[in-house]
Image (cartoon, rainbow, N blue to C red):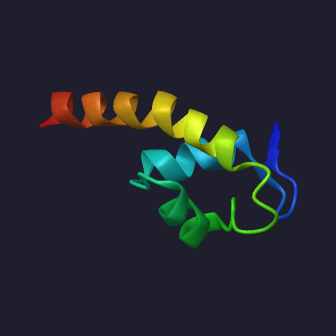
Amino acid sequence: MLVCSCFAVSDRTLRNVIAAGARDVDEIGERCAAGTGCGGCVEEIEDLLDIVAPRCARLTAKAS
């Protein structure tokens, strides 16, 4: 699903960027530009961060 229409960034790309370590909207913007255009997708990006980042942290902790 397309989340950022300004830069054509999908939820899959955002999930991958979060899994690779991005932990806030600014970091995501630096890595894939999502959220740096009109800002209409920022709330959805924050929602994905709330869902995906904790899962990634748990998986990383288990692997250690």
Q: Quadrant of residue 64?
A: top left
The residue nearer to you, when weighing 45 against 13, is 45
Residue at left 68%, top 68%? 33
Residue at left 53%, top 53%? 17
- Identify whether 43 is placed above or below 23: above
Q: Position of residue 61 (x, y in %)?
A: 18, 33
Residue at left 27%, top 28%? 58
- Identify whether 48 is placed above or below 14: above
Looking at the image, residue 28 sits to the left or right of residue 41; the answer is left
The residue nearer to you, when weighing 24 against 57, is 24
Q: Quadrant of residue 39?
A: bottom right
Looking at the image, residue 37 sits to the left or right of residue 45; the answer is right
Q: Position of residue 62 (x, y in %)?
A: 18, 27
Residue at left 67%, top 50%? 42
Looking at the image, residue 19 sits to the left or right of residue 36; the answer is left
**The N terminus sits in image quarter:** top right
- Identify whether 48 is placed above or below 8: above
Q: Position of residue 36 (x, y in %)?
A: 70, 68
